[in-house]
Image (spheres, helix red, strand yellow):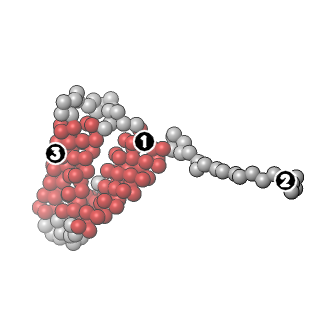
Amino acid sequence: MATGVESAIVTTAAPAIRPRALPLVAVLVGGMLGTALRFGIDLAIPHAVDAFPLSTLVVNVLGALALGLLVANVWPTASDWLKAGLGAGLLGSFTTFSALAVSVVAISGTGDPTLAIGYLAADLGLGLGAALLGLRLGNRGTPPVDLENE
């Protein structure tokens, strides 16, 4: 029987992510993953607040190495959203300057400034070395990446 009202099946697709919003979504997702990885390493390598923060050192050195490899291998051909998600998102939340700063201040409060200075020097020196190593390993057989015009 016809009632004069036709029934229709209405289907709606999930709204597409606008291209301008894609980098932001990538940073959010990458940030969640990086934070979880960071927390996992903090749990695996625990330390007291005023003790040498080995987990922070490990995270910062690994992050610097990973970013160096990515800049050398992925950045030349990667889309903006992928760079944002891996760089600012994943590695930005994985490595944090604030953790380094708080660790140095906490260690300084123990009355042993040499440990704080040693930690700061180790973090910066090993981090810079890891970034350089990542760039060099990533550039094997490829022309060097022009970081100035990137």
Find the residue positioned furthest to the front: 1
Tell me, yes or no, if residue 117 can be seen here: no
Q: Residue at x 71, y 52 (%)?
A: 9
- Which element carries disc 2, helix, strand or loop? loop
**Residues marked 3 and 1 touching at CB (< 8 Å):** no
- In front of the other: label 3 or label 1? 1
- Which element carries disc 1, helix, strand or loop? helix
- Amino acid bearing label 1: Trp
- In front of the other: label 2 or label 1? 2
Work out how far the residue at label 2 is from the one at label 1, CA to CA, in angstroms.
Answer: 47 Å
| Disc nearer the start of the sequence (2/1) | 2
Disc 2 packing (10 Å; few <14; some 14–19; many ≥20)? few
Work out how far the residue at label 3 is from the one at label 2, CA to CA, in angstroms.
Answer: 73 Å
Disc 3 packing (10 Å; few <14; some 14–19; many ≥20)? some
From the image, which quarter does the N terminus lie in?
bottom right
Tell me, yes or no, if residue 126 can be seen here: yes
Residue where numbered disc 1 is placed? 81
